[in-house]
Image (cartoon, rainbow, N blue to C red):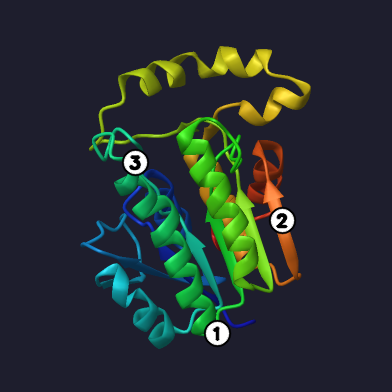
Amino acid sequence: MPRPARIALVGATGLIGRSILKCAVGREDLRLVAIARREVPLPPGARMEVFVAEPARWGEVIEAVRPDALICALGTTIGNVGGDKDAFRAVDHAMVLDTARAALAAGIERMVTVSSVGADRHAKNFYLSVKGETEAELAKVGFNRLDILRPGLLVGARPTESRPAERMAIVVSPAMNLLLHGQYRKYRAIKAETVAAAALALAMRKTRGRYGHDNDAIVRAAAALPLPQGAD
């Protein structure tokens, strides 16, 4: 049997991060290692390592763990930081880039990161411009392989967050998805578990290059992830 891929995950406490933890349960083809600032509740049946450290020391943890690839699911919202744009940039830009550079310095050659549909450093929308700027800087870091996921509206439970407008959008998303065709398909809502499966599948690919994945490509990547052993 081939050696299981060893994958490090940062951003394990968010919606995508928690979905990745669940998706990794029962898998024999990978070993997931979560790195976080605080304790991470693990899903039932999880057999994985969790390292708790301040972000400034994540590079040391990554170097000690020696994973084959890094998945970055770090991210916040303007609302979560009380409208503080500097605080938002500190997470979605600086922390993402610092972690990526630390991973490369530790010998990691592959990275998968979760961005957003519409990310563009020249966008007038602050959120999308920061996401686009981060993508552009990540492309310069020097990974042999970089996968950037750009999902639309994420569908999944966020028990510790209150986002009334987003919850309403999720409720109507099945109907809205039917109306989004052609170039607008990338704006369709997508399940967090689908993004999680795609992230794991892409983290195990060794082909060199830089790849951007919209909703349809994310769905295809998720479908390529084999079922865990013993799954129906």
- Secondary structure under badge 2? strand
- Residue 187 percent coordinates (x, y): 62, 27
- Figure check: 150 above or below 66: above
Q: Earlier in the sequence, mark 3 or mark 2?
A: 3
Name the residue that disc number 1 marks: 107
Cα separation, mark 2 vs mark 1, equals 20 Å
Residue at image location 55% in from the left, 17% down from the top:
174
Where is residue 197? Give x, y as percent: 56, 51
173 vs 216, left or right, is left
Amino acid carrying mark 3 in the image: Lys
Where disc 1 sits, the SS reads loop
Q: Is residue 60 above or below residue 223?
A: below
Contact (CB < 8 A) between labels 3 and 1?
Answer: no
In the image, which disc is placed on residue 211?
2
Horizontal side of 86 relative to 151 (left or right) equals left
Q: Residues within 10 Å of mark 2 (few under 14, many from 20)?
A: few
Q: Earlier in the sequence, mark 2 or mark 1?
A: 1
Residue 64 higher or lower than 170, as above or below:
below
Identify the amino acid type marked 1. Gly
- Could you tell which of marks 3 and 1 lies nearer the N-terminus? 3
Which quarter of the image is occupied by the N terminus? Answer: bottom right
Q: Which mark is residue 85?
A: 3
* Front residue (pair 16, 89): 89
- Which mark is in front, 3 or 2? 3
Q: Secondary structure at mark 3?
A: helix
Q: Quadrant of residue 209?
A: bottom right
Residue 188: horizontal and vertical position, in percent? 61, 26
Percent coordinates x, y for residue 4 in the rendering: 56, 77
**Viewer-nearest residue: 6 or 106:** 106
| Residue depicted at 30% across the width and 68% down the height | 55
The reply to whether the C-beta atoms of the residues labelled 3 and 2 are less than 8 Å apart is no
